[in-house]
Amino acid sequence: MALVEIEVKDKYAVVTINRPEALNALNSQVLDELNAVLDGIDVNEIRAVVLTGAGEKSFVAGADIGEMSTLTKAEGEAFGKKGNDIFRRIETFPVPFIAAVNGFALGGGCEIAMSCDIRICADSAVFGQPEVGLGITPGFGGTQRLARLVSPGMAKQLIYTARNIKADEAYRIGLVNAVYPLEELLAAAEKLASTIAKNAPIAVRNCKKAINDGLQTNMDEAIVIEEKLFGDCFETEDQKEGMANFLRKKDDPNKVKIVDFKNK
Ligand code: CO8
């Protein structure tokens, strides 16, 4: 059985971390399989990805504590880099990722969710960075992404105390965009993915890059990043058809149609 599964749907995919007996904890094999799944995603076919965990209890309960317990300093750093490289791939992947957090999202689980573009969760979800209670720092981007996603003060409080929070608090501090009953979560995530997948893929991709790259720099440089990615959309088939469709609609409302964007 694969530890990471991918199911391709209509222009989007659902990727499932499938190690429920260990609450989907991330060991090296899971990370390698996740990397291979990312290698296999054809962005001409798949325009959004839902990431979730197998079972009803856990999204991802962190990096594998058993595997980490005997690491040397150098091995610890290498393991951190392994996770960071993959999570950074997700963060910069040319299609949006939606984390459907269906339970525990602790340590590396919270961190992989934070590398996704959008997080929604079940009302049973639990988030936290318990690392300092294990004698380590968050090592898959938690110190960086949590401080950027919520406030630095809130990130520091959560990380220093190693306190877990429930879905309602995660929503209140802006860590997730919405909370659903568990049985409705995946459908909600897929609906979001499907909605995104209907829009012009080059434009969506450029929005992701503009937001991500712009947040790393000052406003003067950020608006130049936007200008370039905005300009990059012009002369594409999708831009021409998207705008022509609007203009046809204006002439004759009966001509309204959903544009079948080609990613060209
Ligand atoms: N690693 C390995 N195994 C795990 C993990 C994990 N993170 N979490 C759960 N499991 C396993 C348990 O060992 C258990 O296995 P078994 O049945 O063989 O004993 C099985 O999953 C079920 O777990 P529990 O029996 O503990 O289930 P409970 O419902 O009682 O508790 C909890 C659920 C609260 C989620 C509990 O399992 C728990 O606290 N898990 C650990 C959570 C945690 O601390 N996560 C953070 C890990 S550190 C991390 O992620 C750092 C990331 C950066 C790494 C950088 C590297 C340098």
Image (cartoon, rainbow, N blue to C red):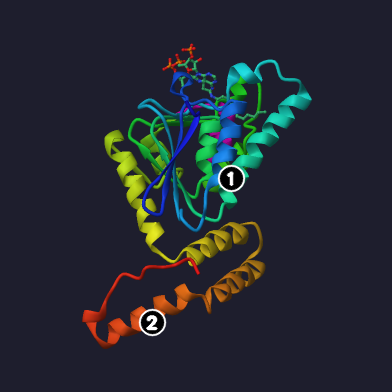
- Quarter-of-image position of residue 178: top left
Q: Which mark is drawn over residue 156? A: none
Examine the rendered structure and indicate whether residue 88 appears above or below residue 236: above
Where residue 97 appears, as percent x and y from the top left, is 48, 48
Q: Nearer the viewer, mark 1 or mark 2?
A: 1
Q: Nearer the viewer, residue 48 or 133?
A: 48
Where residue 38 appears, as percent x and y from the top left, is 56, 44
Examine the rendered structure and indicate whether residue 72 appears above or below residue 59: above
- Callout 1 touching callout 2 (CB < 8 Å): no
Q: Nearer the viewer, residue 6 or 119?
A: 6
* Residue at the spot 58% in from the left edge and 70% down from the top edge: 229
Specify start and end residues of the magenta stretch as a single range: 154-164
Examine the rendered structure and indicate whether residue 251 appears above or below residue 168: below
* Residue at the spot 62% in from the left edge and 27% down from the top edge: 28
- Quarter-of-image position of residue 37: top right
Asked if residue 127 is among those painted magenta in the image, a careful observer would answer no
SS of the residue under disc 1: helix
Q: State the CA–CA distance, disc 1 to disc 2.
A: 35 Å
| 65 left or right, relative to 117 | right
| 178 left or right, relative to 141 | left
Q: Looking at the picture, which amino acid does disc 1 mark?
A: Asp
Q: Which residue is mark 1?
A: 39
